[in-house]
Image: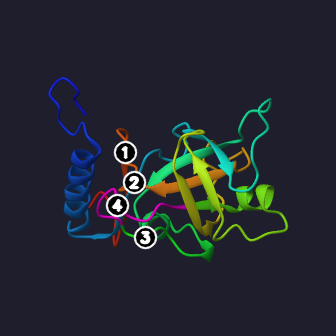
Amino acid sequence: NDAAKGRYFTDDQRRAFYGRALEAVQQTPGVRDAALVSRLPFRGRGETRFEIEGHPIPPDQPAPVSDLRTVTQNYFQTLEIPVLRGRTLAAVIDSSGPKEAMVNRTMAEKYWPNDDPIGQRIRVFGPKGPWVTIVGIAGDVRQMAPDQPPREEVFLSAQLFPNQETSFVVRTTGRPEA
C-alpha cells in the first residue's frame, strides 16, 4: 500500500487487488488451497477490543481484548484448522456482505462457558465498531509460539475488513519448492 501514490489505499481497491492476487495463486499448478490472513502464526499479534451484546461494559472497566485475524473463507481449510461447530465465514464480494465472525475454542469457553456463542453478536474495533454475528468455532492454534497456550481469538472476513498487512497461506499437492 502506497498512500503517496494512492495505490490500494481504499478498502475497495485492497479488496479488488487481494481478490485478483489470491485467484492467481489458486490457479498456480500444484496449489491445492490458498487463503489470505492478516497475521501469520508466530508473527506477532493484532488485537481488538470487543463487547458481547447484552453484556454492557461498566464505564469504569476496560473492554475485553482478543487477538484478531482477518482471513479469507478457506483459511481454515488451507491450514487444516478444524471448524469445531458452526461454519466458516461466508464468501464476501464487497462491503455489503454479512458481518460475521468466528471465534476459537479458548474464547468460546472463556466468554460463553454455559452458552452457545453461535448466533451471538460481538462489537469489534471498540465502542463505535460494527456488530458481527458469530457463525463458527475454530480449533485453537498456538499463534505466538509453540510453548505458549492459545489466546482468545476472533476471525473476521478479510474481504469485508481488508487489512493493509496481508499474507498468503498456501497448501500444495507436492513439494512446494518443486
In this rendering, which labeled residue sits more in front, label 3 or label 4? 4
Q: Distance between the residues labelled 4 and 2?
A: 13 Å
Q: Do the residues bearing badges 4 and 2 touch, measured as CB atoms within 8 Å?
A: no
What residue do we see at 18% from left, 23% from top?
4
**What amino acid is labelled 3 in the image?**
Ala
* Residue where numbered disc 3 is placed: 90
Q: Distance between the residues labelled 2 and 3?
A: 11 Å
In this rendering, which labeled residue sits more in front, label 4 or label 2? 4
* Residue where numbered disc 4 is placed: 96
Q: Do the residues bearing badges 2 and 1 touch, measured as CB atoms within 8 Å?
A: yes
Q: Quadrant of residue 63?
A: top right
What residue do we see at 17% from left, 31% from top?
6
Q: Which of 162 and 151 is in front in this view?
A: 162
In this rendering, which labeled residue sits more in front, label 1 or label 4? 4
Instruction: Give the residues drawn in magenta, as a range.
Output: 92-101
Residue 158 is marked as: 2
